Every structure is written in C-alpha cells, then in structure tokens.
Image (cartoon, grey):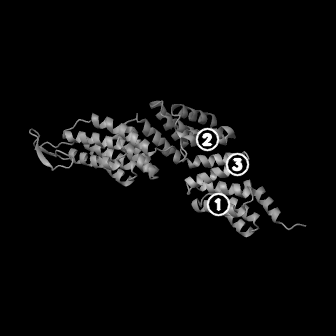
C-alpha cells in the first residue's frame, strides 16, 4: 500500500486538529487555544519539536481543572498561579480538549517516528475519552506502521464502529487486510472509502493493487487511471500502473509510467529497478544496468535490484560479478528463492557443481515450484559442463 510521506502526515495532522480543537468547548484558559494555534503553525513550518512542546503545555493547562479552581499562567514560560472559579466547588470537571491535545501530540510524535510515545499519548486520550474514534484510528496507524496488524485491525474496527464514515479508517483497514492476504476484505474497505470520499485517490490505487493481486488487470488499471486523474503528481500511482502494464507485457507503456514516476520522484529506487527489468527484457542491457546501479545507489538494502543486476551480469558473461550481486541479494533477503537458484546457475557456469547443488537445494526448499520451472535451464548448464567427446 502507498504510505504517507512526512509532508502528507503533517497535512493530515493539521487538517484534523484544526477542526476538532476549534469545535471543542471546555472550561480552559484562553492561552490553551493560543498555544494550540501556535502548535498548528509550528507543524506547518515542520517544527515538530516545537509543536510537541506547545501541545504538552496545552495538556497541562486543560488537565489542571480542579473543584473550584484551575491552574493557569500568563505566558508559556510564566509562573503557575491558581485562579478561582466561583460556583464550581465540589464539581469535578473533565475538559474534552485534554483528550484532543493528547491525540494531537500523539500524531505529532508519529510524524517524528516516536511510535512508542505516540501510542502512549493515544492511550491517554482513550482513557479520558473511550469513544474517541479518531484516537483509535490513529493508534491503529501506529500499530500498522510497527507491523502489528492484529492490533491495528482491532483499533480500525473500533474506530469504524464509533464512526462508520471515517473514509481514511476504511482505507487503512483495507491496507491491513491486504497485508494479511485478506484481499476481498481489503477491496470492500477500499470501495467503502471511495463511496465516502469519491476523490480519495490513494484508495483507488490501493484497490487497484488488490485487484491486480487477483489477476483482475482491467479493473486494476482502471483504478490506477482514476487515481492519476485525481492526483497526477503522485509518483506511486504511476509506478503501480507501470507494474500492472509490465505484468501484462505492455512493456513500452510500462516504461512510460516508470519514466513519469521518476520525473516526479527522482529518488524512487523501485521505479529504477522495475524500469531496469523492462529495459533488460527489451534488449537494452546498458540501460538496464544503469537503472540497477541507480536503484542500488539510492537503496543499498534493496535485494531485488542486486538480484536483477546479478541476472543481467550472468547473461552477459560477467560471472564473478554476478555471484557477488546474488550473494548480496541473499544476505539482504535469505528467504528469496530465486536468488539462490540464479547463483546456482552461475556457479554451474564456473564449474563449481557441488556449490551449485547446495544453492539449488536451498532454493527448492523455499519454493518447490522452482524445481520444475528451472529444470531445463539446470540441465542445459550441466550439459555445458560435461566433457567433450
């Protein structure tokens, strides 16, 4: 699924807290509202630490109400003073803005990738206001980012029970379902998000990915087309459509989409990798190698690019370099069967048959179907090793 950039996270954070804090009416010092507005401004300026500092004071102010009094100070750095509130003796006041401020600070911590701190703040918001749908949703996003899809789904489910019209929650729950292999449930959630927000470009793209995984290419590409129509500046949408066209062997159209993705995001390593694959298939070995080199320079931990460059080097006869690339691919992703199989073929080419057999055994243990797919290639490589008569 497409992920939010830091800028995207900040935009969603601003749009939410501006609406909800302005709508909350509690017995708070006027300075809390001022600080909240300043936190918004600091977020716009990407001053996450400053925003968190302001929201921390907001939490102190809004949670300081007492029976008959509250604490206040005249400036963010001023001394605390007690202010009497006649007529409230014996009354316990819970200000709804405290939960809002915890939620907002949790969102800010999420932007700075302080995931544990974010979860702690969302927990605090939900202790104050258990029916706070947005806090459940945001906590779910953090759980999903941490790879805990079960907890993420539980929070998304709770958020949607409290507010079935949260389109973003449907979109994120769909992503969690997709990651767990529940494709039909994912498609339902993405479709529901689109019903609630017909210009939700990311949901179209995510539904396209889900449909693509089922082999429904026509509707997948239609979803990618719609996502691009809504937001023609999103590189991921072009990448996804390019991958779908590549899978259908519409290779020149795929290259056009990868080209556009790279125009929009020159640091998009996966787009370089995929374009390299298509260029290699089309016989442009130099172009493919350039793309693989660029992909690896941008993301030295991307196993796919090393594997693909290793294959290109094997085909062009650079066997020692091919082994180095395939070994690096295996080091980065030891569960990827194709890299073992390719390295085995290269080792056969170098006459290292016992080492090759070991790689083949590892490859077939991980993916048994590869044995049949590669049988002919392996036999051909072994025939080349056989003594001439």
> What's the CA distance linking mark 3 and mark 1?
16 Å
Q: Nearer the viewer, residue 250 or 49?
A: 49
Mark 2 or mark 3: whose residue is earlier in sequence: 2
Residue 167 placement (x, y as % from top left)? 43, 35
Instruction: Kindly identify the residue that appears in the image at 43 percent across and 40 percent down.
Output: 169
Pointer 3 local density, CA inside 10 Å: few below 14, some 14–19, many at least 20: many
Instruction: Kindly identify the residue that appears in the image at 31 percent across and 46 percent down.
Output: 51
Residue 192 placement (x, y as % from top left)? 48, 34
- From the viewer's perspective, is 156 left or right of 332? left
Q: Is residue 126 visible?
A: no
Residue 338 placement (x, y as % from top left)? 66, 56
Pointer 1 local density, CA inside 10 Å: few below 14, some 14–19, many at least 20: many
The total of numbered circles placed on residues is 3
Element on which disc 1 rests: helix
- From the viewer's perspective, is 157 left or right of 40? right
Q: Mark 3 points at which residue?
A: 280
> What's the CA distance linking mark 2 and mark 3?
15 Å
Instruction: Kindly identify the residue that appears in the image at 76 percent across and 63 percent down.
Output: 349
Element on which disc 3 rests: helix
Q: Which mark is residue 205?
A: none
Residue 73 placement (x, y as % from top left)? 16, 46
Q: Do the residues labelled 3 and 1 touch (CB within 8 Å)?
A: no
Q: Name the residue under label 1.
A: 325
Q: Can residue 189 be seen in this view?
A: yes
Q: Residue 259 carries which label?
A: 2
Picture layout, residue 112 above or below residue 95: below
> What's the CA distance linking mark 2 and mark 1?
25 Å
């Amino acid at each position: 699924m497409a992920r939010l950039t830091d800028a995207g996270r900040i935009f969603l954070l601003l749009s939410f807290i501006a609406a909800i804090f302005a709508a909350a009416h509690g017995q708070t010092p006027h300075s809390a509202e001022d600080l909240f507005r300043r936190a918004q401004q600091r977020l716009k300026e990407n001053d996450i630490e400053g925003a968190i500092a302001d929201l921390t004071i907001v939490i102190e102010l809004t949670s300081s109400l007492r029976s008959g009094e509250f604490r206040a100070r005249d400036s963010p750095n001023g001394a605390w003073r007690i202010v009497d509130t006649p007529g409230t003796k014996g009354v316990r006041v819970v200000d709804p803005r405290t939960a809002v401020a915890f939620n907002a600070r949790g969102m800010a911590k999420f932007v700075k990738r302080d995931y544990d701190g974010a979860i702690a703040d969302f927990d605090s918001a939900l202790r104050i206001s258990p029916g706070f749908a947005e806090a459940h949703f945001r906590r779910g996003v953090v759980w999903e980012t941490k790879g805990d899809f079960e907890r993420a789904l539980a929070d998304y489910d709770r958020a949607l029970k409290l507010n079935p019209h949260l389109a973003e929650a449907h979109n994120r729950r769909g992503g969690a379902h997709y990651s767990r292999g529940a494709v039909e449930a994912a498609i339902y959630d993405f479709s529901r998000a689109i019903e609630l927000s017909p210009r939700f470009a990311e949901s179209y793209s995510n539904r396209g990915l889900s449909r693509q995984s089922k082999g429904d290419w026509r509707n997948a590409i239609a979803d990618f087309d719609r996502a691009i129509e809504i937001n023609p500046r999103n590189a991921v949408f072009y990448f996804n459509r390019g991958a779908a066209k590549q899978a259908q062997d519409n290779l020149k159209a795929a290259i056009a989409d990868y080209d556009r993705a790279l125009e929009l995001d020159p640091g998009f390593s996966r787009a370089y990798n995929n374009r390299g694959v298509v260029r290699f298939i089309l016989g442009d070995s130099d172009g493919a190698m350039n793309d693989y080199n660029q992909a690896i320079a941008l993301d030295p931990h991307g196993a796919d690019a090393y594997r693909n460059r290793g294959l290109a080097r094997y085909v062009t006869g650079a066997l020692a370099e091919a082994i180095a690339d395939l070994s690096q691919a295996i080091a980065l992703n030891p569960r990827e069967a194709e890299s073992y199989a390719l390295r085995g073929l290269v080792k056969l080419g170098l006459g290292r048959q016992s080492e090759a057999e070991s790689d083949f055994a590892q490859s077939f243990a991980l993916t048994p179907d590869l044995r049949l797919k590669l049988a002919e290639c392996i036999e051909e490589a072994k025939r080349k090793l056989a003594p001439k008569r």
